[in-house]
Amino acid sequence: MNKDTLTITDNRTGRSYEISIQNDTIRALDLRQIKVNEDDFGMMSYDPAYTNTASCSSRITLVDGEKGILRYRGYPIEQLAEKSSFLEVAYLNIYGELPDSQQLSFWVERIMHHTFIHENLAKLMQSFRYDAHPMGMLIGTIAAMSTLHPDAKDIYDDQARQKQIWRLLGKLPTVAAFAYRRRIGRPYNYPDSSLGYTENLLYMMDYMNQGDYQVNPVLAKALDVLFILHAEHEQNCSTAVMRGIGSSHADPYSAMSGAAAALYGPLHGGANEAVLRMLNEIATVDNIPGYVEKVKAGKFRLMGFGHRVYKNYDPRARIIKKVADDVLAITGGNPLLDIALKLEEIALEDEYFVSRKLYPNVDFYSGIIYQAMGFPVDMFPVLFALGRAPGWLAQWLELIDDKEQRIARPRQVFLGSEQRDYLPMEQRG
Ligand code: ACO
């Protein structure tokens, strides 16, 4: 018998099936041959929330949740965070290899050249209500971009694809900064392409015509590292949405708008915002034990704790603690950091969290850093989206070129009513 197979016996019929194994997986469609009789649709696997279903093969990111490993294209996240830059990591994730110096300068020049947004888009952003959440503005504005770049529909034209990638990476910081300036009622600052990627973002957000204005290089670097840590994370909720929308051959703006919407939720990219709100609610170190008891009683979750994949530690959380030190050395201490450190200490010793393998994730500290840098809380998920954008694009490109992929269309187990006849109103109970 071929050893790379799985033998399944259907006890309903007594029949056995030999199913081939490749890369430690079986093809779900191979289960279809398992039938009770000829009219039977065939066996399916049931996997709500895709906890054990691979929806694609990918060569971009390896996450080993048990060992706490994260690698982009084979390079450990620790090395990239220390030695690389966000735009270089974006190139690596999208094209598969580190760029040489010529490739890198062309890539950076192209992206920074596309930082200006269409005036219609700037006006559209102006039309949001004064208190609009910047994440809602980002989602809506990315979707609107597709109306301004109809060539984005040519998803099989390599040049058109390249252009949308430069445009998206170039324009996102501008949209983020405009969303922020709109919220606080200040005029937009137009991009300065001579600055670095994160430096330009901070400039567009903060500049107020000061004669001696300069972005603090340590803060720009810290943001760059945070973006590297968020740049890619294989088949998470928002990436799955990017692929799902992309599978219908929608343009990348529409797909990314959906991905950003998925990121908005408090269980995903909205978690860093939720962490800050939680720390503010706890307010003092003395309140931590009472708060933890409520979490254990199932009243709510400890935000920034737990991860679907990482069950020992999140390698990004370690790097981020060091970034927090660098930033706080400049901005001064943050009382919320003291609460966070104590909360982490208490939770890591508590049987509830230990037995469920709940550890701080990347978002536990990112919010504290963002706050120390002066970002308002509702900008946090926007920053996450900016960091994740190259990952979404890398996955989208991989999907488009994958001959095995078709339009994403999951199955369901139908548990509803059998056929029944329509009841006139007067006969209903
Ligand atoms: N606080 C308290 N208990 C928790 C937490 C938490 N943060 N996370 C999980 N649990 C408990 C669950 O109640 C469950 O307990 P039970 O077995 O007694 O019912 C057990 O741990 C397993 O939880 P699941 O929901 O099955 O874990 P899942 O892998 O589906 O969820 C998730 C992962 C969504 C990240 C979850 O841990 C969570 O909600 N965390 C808080 C939100 C957060 O920080 N999200 C950011 C994720 S990282 C990112 O998106 C970049």
Image: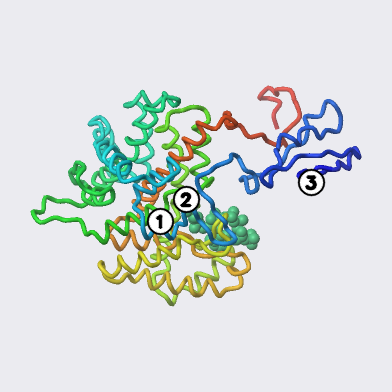
Residue at the spot 89% in from the left edge and 40% down from the top edge: 12
Whether residue 304 is visible: no
The image shows a total of numbered marks equal to 3
Quadrant in the rendering for residue 338: bottom left
Ligand 1: image quarter: bottom right
Mark 3 → mark 1, Cα distance in angstroms: 39 Å
Provide the residue designation for mark 3: 3
The image position of residue 314, as x and y in percent, is 50, 61
Mark 3 surroundings: few (<14), some (14-19) or many (≥20) residues within 10 A: few
- Position of 277 relative to 407 (above/below): below
Picture quarter with the N terminus: top right
Mark 1 surroundings: few (<14), some (14-19) or many (≥20) residues within 10 A: some
Viewer-proximal residue, 40 or 64? 64
Q: Indicate which disc, 3 or 1, sits on the residue closer to the N terminus.
A: 3
Could you tell me the amino acid type at mark 3?
Lys
Quadrant in the rendering for residue 126: top left
Could you tell me the amino acid type at mark 2?
Tyr
Residue at the spot 45% in from the left edge and 43% down from the top edge: 96
Provide the residue designation for mark 2: 72
Q: Indicate which disc, 3 or 2, sits on the residue closer to the N terminus.
A: 3
Residue at the spot 37% in from the left edge and 56% down from the top edge: 226
- Position of 385 relative to 352 (above/below): above
The image position of residue 162, as x and y in percent, is 37, 32
Task: Select label 3 or label 1 by which is in front.
Answer: 3
Provide the residue designation for mark 1: 80
Picture quarter with the C terminus: top right
Viewer-proximal residue, 256 or 281? 256
